[in-house]
Amino acid sequence: MGEALRNMYTVAPKIEQPKNNTKKEIYPEVDALIAENPKLQEAVKLILEECDKYTVGHVFRTANISLTLSEYLGLDEKNQKIFLQAALLHDIGKTEDEINELIKKEGKPSEEEFEIIKKHVRGSVEYAKEIGMPVEVLQIIGAHHEENNGQSYPRNEKNRTLHDETLPERRSEPDEEIKKIIHAFAIIDAFDALSSERSYKKEFSDQDCKEKLVDKFPSEEDARIIDLLFYEK
Ligand SMILES: [Fe+2]
Ligand SMILES: [Fe+2]
């Protein structure tokens, strides 16, 4: 791996993820995955160089949590890799200039601005596709802002549907293991956003965070994943 990239983050042993941690720390397994693919290295470098502190921390934290959860979910090596690749790339669409500027702006985005920010999902799917990521990675990224309560995007439907002829990554129904990852990743993404402080909101307490997650993801299988996130060792 290029020294330049290695100097941009720290490889930390697996430790409890401190909430709202803006340090650029990743677990050794995530580092190893980046090291084996020059295109993924380039993507991580782009995120580190272009994104604001919160987004960089968020991407690294969600990758670390994905690794931890993939062990709880009993994923095989192939699916664990897919999970991590999706986590690292899920918000790369935010490096697109117009979106990036809005993300870096202080304060809560207006409704109009939020409509533009939403487009990062498409941008992330396209980037991942361009660098040759498997369709499963695109499926996970494409659904990372979908919830079951009808306040999500891009589909905004009650009971999210993962099959959609109009979206290239969703022309086929994901297999059961990938569905598990799609559910887990959408929850991890929301969990990290809720438990982080932003310029326009405080971080939520564990209890509030859990309540909000249960509201967004009310199904029984999602409840199991939410419990894993709040599991006390
Ligand atoms: Fe996102
Ligand atoms: Fe995200």
Image (cartoon, grey):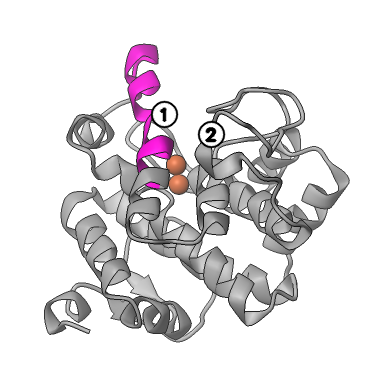
Q: Amino acid at mark 1?
A: Lys
Q: Quadrant of the C terminus?
A: bottom right
In the figure, residue 88 lies in which quadrant? bottom left
Q: Start and end of the magenta stretch?
A: 108-124
Q: Amino acid at mark 2?
A: Leu
As for residue 111 lying within the magenta part, the answer is yes
Residue farthest toward the left in the current orientation of the protein: 4
Q: What's the distance in space between the residues labelled 2 and 1, CA to CA?
A: 15 Å
Q: Is residue 165 above or below residue 33?
A: above
Which of label 2 and label 1 is nearer to you? 2
* Position in image of residue 151 (x %, y %): 62, 23
Total number of numbered discs in the rendering:
2
Q: Is residue 45 above or below residue 71?
A: above
Residue farthest toward the right in the current orientation of the protein: 220
Q: Residue at x 47, y 83 (%)?
A: 29
**Dot 2 or dot 1, earlier in sequence:** 1
Horizontal arrangement in the rendering, residue 170 relative to residue 108 (left or right): right
Disc 1 designates what residue? 118
Give SS at disc 1: loop
Q: Residue at x 50, y 61 (%)?
A: 134
Q: Residue at x 33, y 53 (%)?
A: 130
Give SS at disc 2: loop
Front position in the image: 221 or 93: 93
In the figure, residue 218 lies in which quadrant? top right
As for residue 3 lying within the magenta part, the answer is no
Q: Residue at x 33, y 23 (%)?
A: 116
Disc 2 designates what residue? 167
Q: In terms of image quarters, where does ligand 1 lie?
A: top left
User: Visible in this render: residue 204?
Assistant: no
Q: Quadrant of the N terminus?
A: bottom left
